[in-house]
């Protein structure tokens, strides 16, 4: 009877892992992690750019609606890593930190690290602006000076680009000029 109890105990003892087996598992996990990490970082950078571009398009639409609501011309001034939405003053903005004399700041946005903004507008202005009456991207005082343009956001982590286009009639369109962001339209005309 005593001998049968010892046999039962020996059979129910659970074996553990050896140190060598654990080292092999850790080594395999490390190899897999080094293969996955670069693609994860690239995906993260691409999604960060897409998010910044969507926020920029929303803020441009916000500026257009604020112009109508306030019955005053509202502009969006750009720097390389920021933009500011503001009620236009008596002098032109030269960057997101320098809005001009008499301007009223509504919102300032810092673009995430690794993303650079560049504005292309008629007359080499540092801003786009919206007329309060028609919502068009024209100078409110003259009604004819074109203040439209497009802003290109570029990621330094990859070759990704997103563009927010402001047409003269005040419409905002988001696209990918080099067709690298598949979630955006490739038609940037």
Image (cartoon, helix red, strand yellow):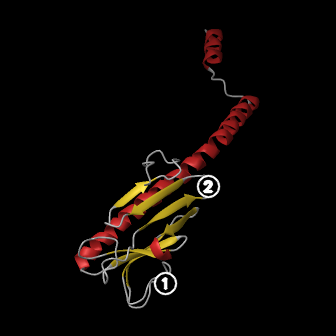
Residue tagged by mark 1? 98
Mark carried by residue 129: none
- Is the C terminus in the top left, top right, bottom left or bottom right quadrant? bottom left
The residue lying at 76 percent from left, 30 percent from top is 20
The residue closer to the viewer here, 113 or 124, is 124
The residue closer to the viewer here, 138 or 70, is 138
The quadrant holding residue 167 is bottom left
Q: What is the total number of numbered labels drawn onto the structure image?
A: 2
The residue lying at 53 percent from left, 50 percent from top is 178
Asked whether residue 77 appears in the rendered view, the answer is no
**In the rendered view, would you say 164 is above or below 26?**
below
Asked whether residue 99 appears in the rendered view, the answer is yes
Left/right placement of residue 62 relative to residue 98 reads left
Whichever of callouts 2 and 1 sits on the residue coming sooner in the sequence is 1
Left/right placement of residue 130 relative to residue 68 reads right
Which label sits in the foreground, 2 or 1? 1
The residue lying at 62 percent from left, 18 percent from top is 9
Mark carried by residue 157: 2
The quadrant holding residue 92 is bottom left
Q: Secondary structure at mark 1?
A: loop
**In the rendered view, would you say 23 is above or below 7?**
below
The residue lying at 44 percent from left, 46 percent from top is 183
Residue 112: image location, x then y, percent? 52, 64
The residue closer to the viewer here, 99 or 145, is 145
Residue 127: image location, x then y, percent? 44, 75
Residue 15: image location, x then y, percent? 66, 24
Classed neighbour count for the residue bearing mark 2: other residues with Cα under 10 Å, few (<14), some (14–19), many (≥20): some
Classed neighbour count for the residue bearing mark 1: other residues with Cα under 10 Å, few (<14), some (14–19), many (≥20): some
């Amino acid at each position: 009877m005593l001998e049968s109890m010892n046999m039962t105990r020996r059979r129910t003892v659970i074996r553990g892992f050896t140190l060598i087996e654990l080292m092999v598992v850790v080594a395999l996990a490390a190899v897999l992690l080094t293969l996955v990490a670069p693609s994860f970082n690239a995906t993260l950078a691409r999604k960060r750019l897409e998010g910044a571009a969507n926020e920029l398009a929303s803020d441009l639409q916000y500026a257009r609606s604020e112009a109508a609501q306030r019955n005053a011309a509202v502009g969006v001034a750009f720097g390389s890593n920021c933009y500011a939405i503001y009620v236009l003053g008596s002098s032109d903005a030269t960057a997101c930190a320098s809005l001009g004399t008499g301007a009223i700041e509504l919102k300032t946005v810092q673009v995430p690290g690794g993303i650079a903004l560049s504005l292309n507008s008629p007359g080499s202005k540092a801003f786009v602006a919206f007329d309060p009456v028609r919502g068009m991207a024209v100078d409110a005082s003259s009604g004819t000076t074109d203040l439209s343009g497009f802003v290109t956001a570029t990621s330094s982590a990859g070759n990704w680009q997103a563009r927010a286009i402001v047409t003269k009639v005040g419409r905002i369109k988001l696209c990918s000029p080099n067709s690298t962001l598949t979630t955006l339209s490739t038609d940037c005309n």
